[in-house]
Amino acid sequence: MARGDGQTTLTLADAARRAGITPATLRRWTEQGIVPLQDGAWTPAAAAQARIVARLHERGHSLEAIREASEEGRLAFGYAEELLPAAEGGIPLKEAAKRTGLEPALIRRLLIALGYPERTAEQIPERELALLRRAADALEAGFPLVALLQVVRVYGQALAQIADAEVRLFHLYVHEPLMRDGVPGLEIAEQIEQLAGALLPLTSPLMDLVHQRFLRHFLEQDVIGHMELDEQLGEELGRLRVAIAFADLAGYTRLTEEIGEEKAVDVVDHFVRAVELTLPDDARLVKTIGDEVMVVCPDGAALALWAVGFQELYTERPRPRIGIHSGEVLYRDGDYYGREVNLAARVVARAGASEVLVTRSIVSLAEEQLAFERVGEVRLKGFSDSTELFLARPLEG
């Protein structure tokens, strides 16, 4: 049922069912002010709030503490759930397998790869059923199963990170300031719902546009890579030959102690942004771990040239250090694994501030574009054999 303002209203029984509690409990919590109502009506937002209260109570929080938190607006974010209605009902796994043509075990693997809880596979909601049909179409068209599982896992991980960032940033920059200003709980809930409702319509078009832009970019780079790097053809499936660079800020831990965590994070943000803006077109920043970034590039010489140039141009403190190695890596779920990746990570640990330290594999690729000073044979942590290391510098003149 819809109210005059367009908002959905529920019966007490429906709201209690959504919250996972009895109608009597929900009525009591409302009378005690633990679950406030908007204009005295049961709404999906109120049911979402009651569900949060039930979860908190199960975890040992007293009803009085929960009521105070509700009045202060600390639980108001729950009202935004009205914009994101949960799927209800569903069909059994075996029936979903018949409708999609997928094996039950494969359906379970796909949902878990997306990040869904395992229990979701027991009763498949209609929205997920449509998604599974599209997965079946991709397999029928000839897309390899091993690739489908990996790309689905990447989608799940990337979207989970996006959703986590949205919630946390909304909390830090919208929810907390409202609480600090002493805004009443229901008013906080209304403002959060209004702002979230304005943001949500932007999300899907933005992700679709950015996805297509980067998809076009990496398709182009892949075609160029096949033309220029013939030696990659014929290698074992799932393996690639790339150059790997790790870069971090020398003395970052000490800097954090000196200037505090917040200012130190700003320094890292500036460093990461500088890396992103200067990388060669066919290089990609794979991930950041604290103050460290990992970059891969099919062209080892281009990556080494970038590293040397970056060290000359980046004048901020603390100064970066960069380690580069090239070799065959295992590509899985959008990331790179294997011995060569580990070796590159150990190389940067031996570099000093402002240095670019590379292995023999990079020297052989870039010896005509850069100068290399041999450091010597070094025993890197975790490796039984010594590794020959070189300092990379610009050619004189």
Image (cartoon, rainbow, N blue to C red):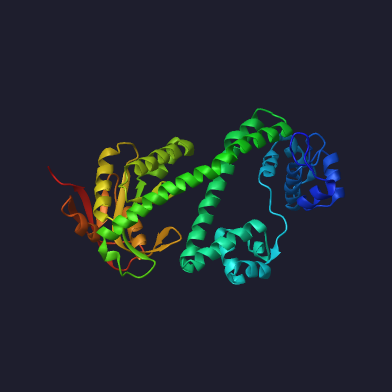
Front residue of 150 and 28:
150
What residue is shown at x 18% (from left), y 53% (from top)? Answer: 373
Query: On screen, 248 above or below 100?
Result: above
> On the rendered structure, is 393 left or right of 130?
left
What's the residue at 20%, 59% (across, down)? 364
Q: How many marks?
A: 0
Q: Is residue 210 left or right of residue 364?
A: right
Image quarter for residue 42?
A: top right
| Quadrant housing the N terminus | top right
Identify the residue at horizontal 59%, vertical 41% (top origin).
200
Instruction: Residue 353: name its quadrant.
Output: top left
Give the x, y percent position of residue 25: 85, 48
Q: Residue furthest left?
A: 397
Q: Is residue 334 left or right of residue 43?
A: left
Above or below for 1 versus 100: above
Residue at 61%, 59% in the rendered image = 130
Q: Is residue 280 visible?
A: yes
